[in-house]
């Protein structure tokens, strides 16, 4: 055999070997960051994703869930940069917590934009959702699927809230985006930013009077125990969850593995969304059972809140992108 032919054969063999190996070498463990652990739906979604990936890879791909934003020392608004830089491999993040880095995610926080579940779906499952995913990709993270934290309802320790003036001067814990400061300032309240890790202590000492979170979070975290005995179901916004991957980690998987992991995320997300939504009536009952006064708003009462927060749209539409806000509004109108 000629020397050149032999060399060509050897190098071809080597190349075949390395490209097979490039995809076959898995890390011992892939980190998955969340803010809430099990049994919150968010944590359940992460465990489900890990289970599906393990099952569908015959145990070869090991996702390990790190809840309480512990990979970023509880600082939930630093999760996205950590995912982008590779400190975290995968994450399921709230649009609220990632909005400091991806301004388009503030879309979902516009007050009273999404009146019902169909409106959320019209956004996440349509063109607006694709535009949001494109924005996430543009920031160097690979979005894979949607989940849902839920409609965020308002609780406080002072009294029943049915109109904007009831919020006058109330200290409300918020997180993630200055948009929330604008919303609560527009209502005459006194918003303060803090991580979830600090929220319950701040409520228990009375450093803040109120907070906003989905019923699942209120109930599972026993927020009634820290004096939050009034809850208004105003559905002012809902935060979807985004399943996502670090770009380099993603590129280290074969196309087949990528398709499997993405489908597992979609399946876990749909399962979690369905479970979260169907739990609402029993959560409401459980919360009332703890002595919390739960108030439903009439349409007219919600309209008063919507009108009082209209300035937030003027301020934030240019930040989110006019095109995206219009696409979202049309999708909701046509739902
Ligand atoms: O901190 C919150 O309020 C929480 C748990 O709902 C989020 O991570 C957005």
Image (tube, rainbow, N blue to C red):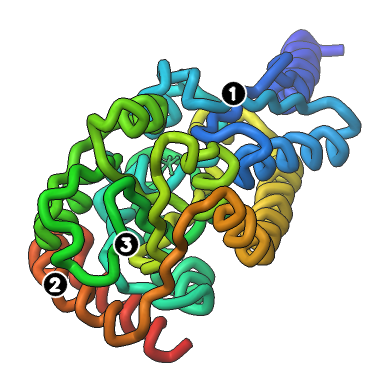
- Per the rendering, the mark at residue 160 is 3
- Residue 89 in view, yes or no: yes
Residue lying at 10% horizontally and 61% vertically, measured from the top left? 186
**Image quadrant where residue 328 sits:** bottom left
**Image quadrant where residue 139 sits:** top left
> How far, Cα to Cα, is label 2 from label 1?
39 Å
Residue lying at 62% horizontally and 42% vertically, measured from the top left? 40
| Nearer to the camera, 210 or 263 | 210
Q: Which residue is mark 1?
A: 66
Q: Earlier in the sequence, mark 2 or mark 1?
A: 1
Percent of width and height locating residue 277: 62, 64
Ligand 1's quadrant is top left
Of badges 3 and 1, nearer the viewer stands 3
Of badges 2 and 3, nearer the viewer stands 3
Residue lying at 50% horizontally and 24% vertically, measured from the top left? 88
Specify whether 158 is left or right of 257. left
Q: Secondary structure at mark 3?
A: loop
Q: Which residue is mark 2?
A: 308
Percent of width and height locating residue 318: 12, 63
**Tag 2–tag 3 contact (CB < 8 Å):** no
Specify whether 316 is left or right of 5. left
Q: Of all residues shown, which one is farthest toward the bottom?
A: 334
Q: Secondary structure at mark 1?
A: strand
Q: Is residue 328 above or below residue 76?
A: below
Specify whether 311 is left or right of 146. left
Of badges 2 and 1, nearer the viewer stands 2
> How far, Cα to Cα, is label 2 from label 3?
18 Å
**Image quadrant where residue 312 sits:** bottom left
Q: Of all residues shown, which one is farthest toward the right?
A: 58
């Amino acid at each position: 055999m000629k020397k050149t032919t032999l060399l060509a054969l050897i190098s071809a063999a080597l190349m075949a070997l390395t490209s097979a190996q490039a995809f076959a070498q898995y890390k011992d463990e892939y980190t998955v960051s969340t803010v809430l652990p099990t049994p919150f739906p968010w944590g359940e979604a992460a465990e489900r994703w890990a289970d599906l990936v393990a099952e569908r890879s015959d145990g070869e791909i090991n996702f390990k869930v790190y809840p309480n934003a512990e990979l970023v020392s509880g600082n939930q608004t630093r999760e996205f940069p950590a995912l982008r830089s590779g400190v975290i491999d995968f994450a399921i993040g709230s649009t609220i917590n990632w909005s400091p880095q991806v301004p388009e995610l503030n879309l979902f926080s516009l007050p009273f934009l999404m009146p019902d579940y169909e409106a959320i779906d019209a956004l996440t499952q349509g063109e607006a959702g694709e535009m949001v995913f494109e924005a996430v990709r543009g920031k160097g993270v690979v979005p894979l699927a949607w989940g849902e934290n839920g409609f965020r309802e308002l609780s406080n320790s002072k009294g029943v809230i049915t109109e904007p003036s009831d919020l006058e001067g109330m200290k409300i814990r918020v997180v993630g985006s200055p948009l929330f400061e604008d919303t609560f300032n527009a209502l005459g309240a006194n918003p303060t930013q803090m991580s979830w890790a600090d929220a319950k202590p701040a409520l228990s000492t009375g450093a803040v009077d109120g907070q906003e979170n989905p019923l699942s979070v209120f109930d599972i975290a026993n927020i009634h125990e820290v004096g939050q005995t009034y809850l208004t179901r105003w559905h002012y916004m809902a935060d979807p969850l985004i399943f996502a991957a670090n770009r380099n980690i993603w590129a280290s998987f074969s196309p087949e593995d990528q398709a499997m992991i993405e489908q597992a995320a979609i399946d876990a997300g749909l399962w979690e969304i369905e479970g979260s939504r169907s739990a609402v009536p029993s959560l409401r009952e459980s919360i009332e059972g703890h002595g919390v006064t739960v108030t439903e708003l009439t349409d007219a009462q919600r309209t008063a809140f919507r009108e009082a927060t209209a300035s937030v749209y003027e301020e934030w539409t240019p930040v989110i992108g006019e095109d995206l806000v219009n696409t979202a509004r049309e999708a909701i109108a046509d739902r």
